[in-house]
């Protein structure tokens, strides 16, 4: 369990570090005069946005995963102690899991807004 968790954290860190580099490598070369200073403001904003999206999705899904695990653990323990109440416990568990899953969907929506409709790009001036 601990080894799996460290592998997941390591892979998340690796993705967060390599995503801005991949985005910067795909950007076309600026068409500035030789010797003129190059403005990297837009690239910095996009790189920081990618980093923010990675962190938001990472924490959003880790939090909901832990919450779902706790909910399912409590429900199975409750059914084990009182099998006659399985229907009510299952219904309550399903509603709770739907509410928890909505938090991950909210994180995804915010991430998509930051990626594709980034409100900060208009302030960069390019």
Image (cartoon, rainbow, N blue to C red):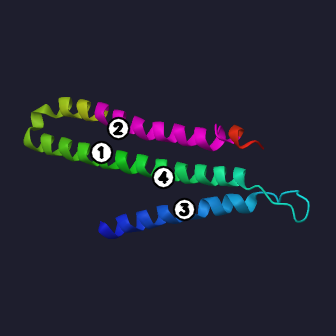
Q: Which of marks 4 and 2 precedes in the sequence?
A: 4
Q: Which mark is residue 15?
A: 3
The vertical placement of 91 against 3, above or below, is: above
Q: Which mark is residue 80?
A: none
Secondary structure category for the residue under label 1: helix
**Residue at numbered disc 1:** 67
Q: Which of marks 2 and 1 precedes in the sequence?
A: 1
Disc 2 from disc 4: Cα separation: 18 Å
What is the magenta segment's predominant secondary structure?
A: helix
Q: Which of marks 3 and 2 precedes in the sequence?
A: 3
Query: Where, quadrant-wise, is the C terminus in this rendering?
Result: top right
Disc 2 from disc 3: Cα separation: 25 Å
Q: Nearer the viewer, mark 2 or mark 4?
A: 4
As for residue 105 lying within the magenta part, the answer is yes
**Residue at numbered disc 4:** 55
Q: Nearer the viewer, mark 3 or mark 1?
A: 3
| Range of residues picked out in magenta | 95-121
Secondary structure category for the residue under label 4: helix
């Amino acid at each position: 369990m601990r080894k799996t968790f460290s592998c997941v954290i390591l892979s998340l860190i690796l993705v967060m570090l390599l995503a801005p580099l991949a985005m910067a490598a795909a950007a076309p070369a600026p068409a500035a005069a030789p010797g003129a200073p190059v403005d990297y403001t837009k690239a910095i904003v996009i790189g920081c946005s990618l980093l923010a999206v990675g962190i938001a999705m990472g924490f959003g899904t880790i939090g909901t995963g832990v919450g779902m695990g706790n909910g399912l653990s409590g429900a199975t323990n409750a059914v084990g102690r009182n099998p006659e109440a399985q229907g009510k416990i299952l219904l309550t568990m399903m509603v709770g899991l739907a509410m928890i899953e909505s938090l991950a969907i909210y994180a995804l929506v915010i991430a998509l807004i930051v990626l594709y409709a980034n409100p900060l790009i208009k302030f960069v001036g390019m």
